[in-house]
Amino acid sequence: MLLHRDDERARLDKALRTCTGGTAQLVLVEGAPGCGKTRFLQYAADTAGARGLTVLHAAADPATRHEDHALLRRLAACRAGDPSPSVPGPDLTGTGFADLLRAACEDGPVALCVDDLQYADHASLAELMHLVHALRGARLLTVLARSPHHRTDDSELHTELLRHQGFVRVPLTCLDARSTAELARFWGTPVPAAATERLHRLSGGNPLLVRALLAEQQDAADGRPEWPEPEPGGPFAEAFATCVRRCGPAARRLALALAVLGPQADLPRAARLARLGTDTAARARNALDAAGLIAGARLRHPTAESAVLGPLTSPQRRSMHRQAARILHHALAEPLAVARHLLAAGAAGHDWEIQALRDATRQEPFSPGDPDDAQAFLQLARSSCPKEPTRLRITLELADRAWRLNPAAAHHLLDEPQAALRAGRLAAADAGWLARLLAGQGRLEEADEALTLAAWDNARPAPDGVPSVPPTRVAEIPAQVFGREVRPTGLSQQARPEYPVTHERPAGPVTRAAALWFRPSTGDDVPAAERLLADTPPAQATFGSVGLALHTLVHHRPHRAVAWSRRLGERIPAPGAPGWQAFFATARAEALLRLGDLAGARREATSALDHLAGRGGPFLLAPLAVLLQALTELGEYAAAAPCLHPTLPGESYSTVHALAFLRARGRHFLATGRPQAALEEFLEVGRTAGRWALDQPELLPWRTDAAQALLRLGRPAEAQTLVADQLALPAATGARVRGITLRLSAATAEPRRRVALLMRAADELRDYGDRLELARCLADLGSALRLGGEGTRAGTITRRAWQLADDCGAVPLREAIRPAAAPERAAPATGHGDIVPLSAPEERVATLAAQGHTNREIATKLFVSASTVERHLTCVYRKLGISRRQDLPMELRTHSYERV
């Protein structure tokens, strides 16, 4: 049964009736591959046989097109009764076949059906044309089927056919969407209306492709709104490749070109890539279009493109991609399109190819599915570039890009430019770029060296007006240019000389490089930082600014830093930028640590380390420092032990990230009873921070760390000096730094001043939100009050400190506070019996009173009368065993009356 071929069948039936009436007929069936020519020819043969005609039915074989009379032998075999048209008949000449056909026509009407006429051998084709015209008076129906766009050896064939008096042309075209759906239903797969359009778009209305798609998706009628994607290498792909092949050599070459060019394909570009003339390319395009294989200048689907490219060898495919890149470059296409073809080719040596790869890296954003395209482009350009100055510049670009994917690789990529700089082969402008990248990786001494060499490079004349350093060793440059000795640095590997405990900086700080890595900020900078984060998505060009803004929040508004770091991390697909994800997770971990959320800090630091697995490099020390400190505060010393001495390649301790790690390791030593080892770590941090111009207490409060170690060692005078020095620093203005410093100042102050200092410290820490440091401060305040004879207040504040430490999960601190804070060991209030819990209204009034509000202000806030406030305060005083509001517990200042 032929669906939607009513007109075609009517023409065939008319020709059949005319033939049986005594007049010869010639029917030419034309259609693209897959459009049903063979099926229609079979219908013609079956219909003729049912009406009593003698049927000779055979198909030309392209394998025998150069064998004379091969088609005639196949037809003769059919006349001899052989049911298989592939078995050749007797060896006969054109004259023998003519006699056979005349004899058949004398016996009755004959139907001569020939498929794939375009593959017929020349001798058979000539004899057939002769017989068709010679037997015009016989009852002969000749039905020929061919692909109209396929070139044959006889270009005058169609004209010869037109000369026949009974000529009828039957074109077979692709189906429309409605006919496609009906064909699917006929073959047992009803297609939902929503999927019909996609089925037609994928198949182009080609019946063979429709059937192939139906064979892939037997359950397509399960209510899916869209037709499923074709299977790679499945029936659709195989049928598509077959149709392309049967469209002819020129069409196949054009299809290959279209598949290689992909989205950038058009007919002129594809013709150049396929090396086809204008007319030949136009005919090839018409053949593909007639078969429904293309839409515009694109193959129907990526699966179809893969099927067409499948027979190519790898060298052939690479060659075509490189030719495509050249064609697109000459057509002024986007560098990204050119670069992707060069990447597929795996080769680039010409200047324009190198430049196209570099230009493509600046076209962001890249697809989330191909996050490392930019890095791959630069890697290819670097490996292919023969010119050292350009290759060094590409290496710097690659290092800049590589950090988002692999911080360790970015670290090592700078080795080659550094060596070139020291040998005098790196341009001054590139030396400045190198310094910025080194500073961004925390390698401040190396960055300062690059800046110094760049300055020396610009200061010396060179031939041809190009400033450059002669090819000498660094050691030959006068020492006064540096102001210090140029040497490799490694904090953990160096022998650490003994320094007196002092706050004086060593000579020769690397201030220029430090300014590239860290910019001091205050709480006033927070609004601007949040505006920048809100308006600036993380991208290659903006990541440095985003990082600085985020660190401003970490130092001054950690709770906002937690929210922003999470939001920024969610904007980046995790597989696409593990380096950036690790950076944001580290910032989040540090912010949580500053808030006293030890479990959260451990979780986020572990997440950062997971992102950096196998590719962290020296940056690995940054999240490791947070993890080590969190584990130490949690009291999980055994879990922290493996973090104390990480194995990292190279001079990993020569970066800024090592300072935070050494400080965390010192705090671990201090917590585990090794104050001398802790002091050495803290002093090393201080010496290096001073040399690197990073002596910022908001960033590295090493003085208070060292003061705690000195107090443990029984050296309070030196501790007091360090604390006083930190308080005197202009940069020590942050609430957290001042709170910690005031707490340690109280530890070395006279007893009569301790309570006041600790209350100021508690206010600072409460405003900042660091619950862990607030717990330490309140514990010290409770001890100071107890020594001053205020046992009731001391017990209340100490219990609050214990509760904060417990909330943070700081087991060692909680246990240290517990003897004085545990409920079972709390002393009763003097003269007033046991302490009775406050009711909710009483606690609200007491909270506001402790915060300094008058009775009238409290009444206004709580919408009660002044007398009610006085009554509640009287009850509070009685329960707490106090007689005035100045004695209200310190812990009430940290409460919010709205939450009570």
Image (cartoon, rainbow, N blue to C red):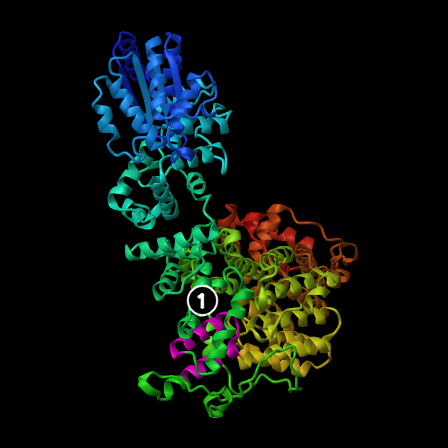
Nearest the eye: 840 or 370: 370
Residue 268 is left or right of residue 467, and the answer is left
Q: Vertically, is 322 above or below 788? A: above
Q: Vertically, is 235 above or below 139? A: below
Residue drawn at (61%, 53%) of the image: 873
Q: Amino acid at mark 1?
A: Arg
Residue 330 in the magenta stretch? The answer is: no
What residue did someone put label 1 on? 382
Q: How many tags in the picture?
A: 1
Q: Position of residue 469 (x, y in %)?
A: 41, 85
Nearest the eye: 874 or 22: 22
Task: Give the magenta range.
Answer: 427-455
Image-quadrant location for residue 798: bottom right
Nearest the eye: 511 or 176: 176
Q: Position of residue 476 (x, y in %)?
A: 49, 91
Q: Residue furthest right?
A: 825
Q: Position of residue 614 (x, y in %)?
A: 61, 61
Picture quarter with the N terminus: top left
Q: Position of residue 554 (x, y in %)?
A: 52, 62
